[in-house]
Image (cartoon, helix red, strand yellow):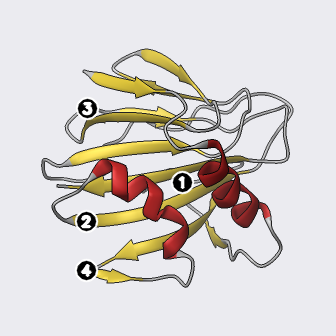
């Protein structure tokens, strides 16, 4: 089971976050594996880790606070932004679980594009300011896109 919520943030809150993540000052870091063990052409991505190991890991954490204010997590595990480069055709990545233990997952779509996420064999389209909520025991996978400069998603793992 999953839940999709459109227009999750107020328009101005979303635009502040999106503009910051699209700016030249926002740091993205190359990761050769989108999914652990999944290597090869177009299997890499860029990441920005906002939060990990019980610590803020970024000077940009304040930009995800409006999302956290609505999620109201009891405890955070990880907040990671993913940026996937476009290609001529959609690349589907491998099914995976974010964690080996039970927790909550929230995927927040930063920009509109023709990429998507598959959760429980159902397709959720990438629509800016949309969030999808589900449990970590549900396997899922994402894609890149073909119709924009990149596909940006923020992944929240929490209790």
Cα–Cα span, label 2 and label 4: 7 Å
- Relative to residue 15, is residue 77 depicted above or below? below
Circle 3 is placed at which residue position? 138
Dot placed on the residue nearer the N-terminal end, 4 or 3: 4
Q: Residues within 10 Å of mark 2 (few under 14, many from 20)?
A: some
The image's mark for residue 6 is: none
Dot placed on the residue nearer the N-terminal end, 3 or 1: 1
In-front residue for pair 68/22? 68
- Relative to residue 20, is residue 118 depicted above or below? above
Dot placed on the residue nearer the N-terminal end, 4 or 1: 1
Circle 2 is placed at which residue position? 76
Q: Nearer the viewer, mark 3 or mark 1?
A: 3
Dot placed on the residue nearer the N-terminal end, 1 or 2: 1
Q: Quick one: quadrant of the N terminus?
A: top left
> Residue 87, can we see it?
yes
- Is residue 6 found left or right of 44 in the rendered image? left
Cα–Cα span, label 4 and label 3: 24 Å
Dots 2 and 4: beta carbons under 8 Å? yes
Q: Position of residue 123 (x, y in %)?
A: 50, 17
Name the residue at 54% across, 59% down.
Answer: 81
Circle 1 is placed at which residue position? 34
Q: Secondary structure at mark 3?
A: loop
Dot placed on the residue nearer the N-terminal end, 2 or 4: 4
């Amino acid at each position: 089971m999953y839940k999709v919520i459109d227009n999750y943030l107020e328009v101005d809150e979303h635009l502040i976050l999106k503009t910051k993540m699209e700016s030249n000052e926002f740091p993205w870091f190359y990761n050769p594996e989108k999914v652990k063990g999944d290597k090869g052409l177009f299997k890499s991505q860029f990441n920005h880790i906002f939060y990990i190991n019980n610590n803020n890991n970024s000077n940009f954490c304040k930009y995800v606070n409006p999302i956290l204010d609505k999620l109201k997590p009891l405890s955070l595990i990880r907040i990671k932004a993913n940026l996937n480069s476009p290609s001529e055709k959609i690349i589907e990545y491998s099914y995976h679980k974010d964690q080996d233990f039970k927790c909550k997952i929230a995927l927040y779509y930063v920009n509109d594009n023709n990429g998507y996420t598959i959760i429980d064999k159902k397709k959720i389209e990438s629509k800016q300011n949309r969030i999808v909520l589900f449990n970590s025991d549900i396997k899922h996978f994402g894609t890149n896109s073909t119709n924009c400069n990149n596909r940006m998603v923020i992944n929240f793992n929490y209790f």
